[in-house]
Image (tube, coloured by chain):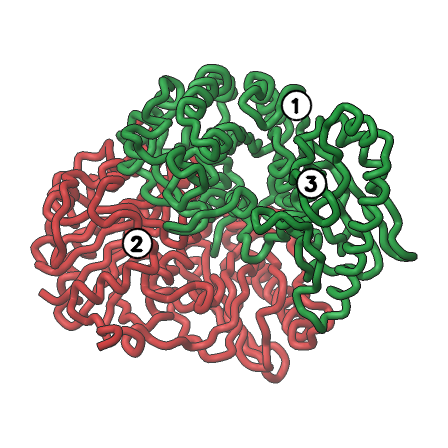
Chain colours: A red, B green
Amino acid sequence: MNKAILFIIDGLGDLPTPKTALQAAKKKNFDWLAKNGVCGLMSTIDRGITPGSDVSHLQLFGYDPKEYYPGRGPLEALGVGINLQEGDVAFRANFATVDGKKIIDRRAGRISTDIGKALEKYVNMKIGPFVTAIFKSSVEHRGALVLRGGDVDDGITDTDPHGHGDYILECKPMNSIDQRGITTSEIVNEFTKRVFALLNNAEENKKLEAQKKLKANIILLRSAGQYRPIVSIKERFDISAACVAGGALYKGIAKYVGMDIVNVQGATGTAQTDLKAKGNAVVTALKNHDVVFLHVKACDSFGHDGNFNGKVKMLERIDKELLPILIKSKANIIITGDHSTPCIRKAHSGHEVPILIYGDERKDKVGKFDEVACMNGGLGHLRGKDVMPIILNLIRKEKMYGS
Amino acid sequence: MNKAILFIIDGLGDLPTPKTALQAAKKKNFDWLAKNGVCGLMSTIDRGITPGSDVSHLQLFGYDPKEYYPGRGPLEALGVGINLQEGDVAFRANFATVDGKKIIDRRAGRISTDIGKALEKYVNMKIGPFVTAIFKSSVEHRGALVLRGGDVDDGITDTDPHGHGDYILECKPMNSIDQRGITTSEIVNEFTKRVFALLNNAEENKKLEAQKKLKANIILLRSAGQYRPIVSIKERFDISAACVAGGALYKGIAKYVGMDIVNVQGATGTAQTDLKAKGNAVVTALKNHDVVFLHVKACDSFGHDGNFNGKVKMLERIDKELLPILIKSKANIIITGDHSTPCIRKAHSGHEVPILIYGDERKDKVGKFDEVACMNGGLGHLRGKDVMPIILNLIRKEKMYGS
């Protein structure tokens, strides 16, 4: 079948302690695919380089982040479902709790997703005659803010200290003589002041206060980025592509490159995600798409938490619940990670990730899918930029170079 | 430990006759590291390319020589301990023996290091109102000359024929209408004339003549390069680094990129170098540096001499005297060469060099450290540019790309 599933297991790669999570997991379907496919190792960006999930996914989709990375803000905003317009400046936003300028909790005690949704109405506002603030909450304290109109610019600093102190920061222009940056920073500061007044007195927060809970009385902003539409994956590679993911960021990146977003009931971006539902959604999406991007987040989260057993169990769930559905689809299957998140580091790292291709390829002698077995794989050592051309070749959408 | 030793064995790679020097050497510590680490092959610049030691070290330190190579002159001058200033034009310099314009001996009979030192005073001089010639001798007939002031330029030719004839050459501008090159070449020719007059009549040379020895009565200049300070390794990668080396060139390259130079008693850059003293200096330097660059020269020299047994014995000395000290340090260890110097070629070559990483990495199945065993290593085929990102990842100084 001239179709492909690009299955990205977030934070897949690990370091041995003494086994890696992949080596420790019982995973007969991964190993069956390795045995019947071809394996290798991959650096998403380049050898030794540690990428964030945003740039690494862009690169795996065939978009060099040096050229196409718009910053985290626009990708988050697209992910929560805001339809961005050219020139919009988007931020990653957090509900938080402040007392004066002091931040009591950067996550407002991880308010429920429902309360976040209920508070949205206070955060959407007009600022001055030209600018609209558009806010959408996502999961718990998380959300995205977009400033639209009035010639806003992304050359501004964060109000979220994000690990650099306990006080809400004043937004400033990155360049002190840039008039658009100056104006935008003033708009952000005005937004922050007004949003505090509105949230601090909101009915929902009074209820939280009565329950002795932290109020979600401020919005912290970071990672401003200006949105410009880019050439779509359809125009660029002549393929139709769909995205099956739980996390907002991954949907955002997919939408940014022009994939269709398949919303799946039960796909949460957490360890409780409904893998069978996601697998079935992939199979359905394959009917009218050339490539389906499938994302599972939890292995990365377990890596960040240093939870080795959690990572192993998640891989075992993927093996048992998800892979049989993918294998039955008869599509070409590419399985890899966007980066390593070794449990002993509790952070992304620059170590290569294993990659496996099952389908219209030669087979190598690798019979297990893990970091060490893949060292001697037939694919050798790939870069993330190699993946999209390889997929196009698998699904017969390759364009001949020369004649 | 979040520290690393970058151990460069100059000219490490070899060709089989029928074994390579690494294959012939008894080297249980190299092999222990290979067994407990991950191996591969590396081209310092690119596949098949034969680099000089200067550009290959720059590349291994994370500085693309296409952008940062200042020519050999400034690196030699820094290596002999001249504090260069922006705009200085530096040369590799040789004491030699001339009769008129004819060169009798390009190395002045390899005068002793002491005589070289004693002759320094004749070579330091003012030329015209603006230019100062600063000279420092190093080992035997070797030294470096710096021209400072007067808007000097490096667009000039050598006075040292260096294998192209027996006559001292007139210095010329590379571009005949370049006024700075014209002026600088006139300064060099004036320097050469005056230095001959001073040296030929020097007390020290009269003594040599009385002993029927060759006089060191001229200075031959080559490899002019203009010095510009570059971004330091500290600013560029946020690491502190130290250099443990015997040879002046290697200290010069290390100084050029902003490493601290550790001077080690008994480190000579020859086969007699005190390897234990160097190993101990590395361990000490690790206390207050993130990365210590360790250089051993003699394997390259034996390669140039075609002395296979000498190269084997030197590797065995490294294995016995140096590696146990490095292993005990608990730092990450990277061992590689700057290029191959196959004994049967008596010259640098473009064959890959083996590379070994022991530390915060996965292990592969390679159990021996040599050119052939490393072909199947888990690192695959690296480029020199990959080495610094890999080191930063090992020592947790990686910067995340994206977010």
Check disc 1 and give the amino acid type.
Val
Q: In the rendered view, does A114 fall on the left or right side of A241?
A: right
- For the point 42% across and 59% down, the residue is A55
Q: Mark 1 falls on what kind of element?
A: loop
Left or right of A156 in this view: A133: left
Q: Which residue was labeled with disc 3?
A: B94
Residue B39 in view in this figure:
yes
Residue under disc 3 on the same chain as residue under disc 1: yes
Crowd tier of the residue under label 3, counting other residues whose Cα lies within 10 Å: few below 14, some 14–19, many 20 or above:
many
Tell me if A37 is positioned left or right of A247 in this view: left
Tell me what residue is drawn at x 71 percent, y 39 percent: B97
Q: Number of labelled discs?
A: 3
Residue closest to the far right: B129
Q: Which of B56 and B203 is in front in this view?
A: B203
Q: Name the residue under label 2.
A: A268
Labels 3 and 2 touching (C-beta < 8 A): no
Q: What element carries label 3?
A: strand
Q: What amino acid is found at the position of numbered circle 2 in the picture? A: Thr
Residue A73 lies, in percent from the top left, at 49, 64
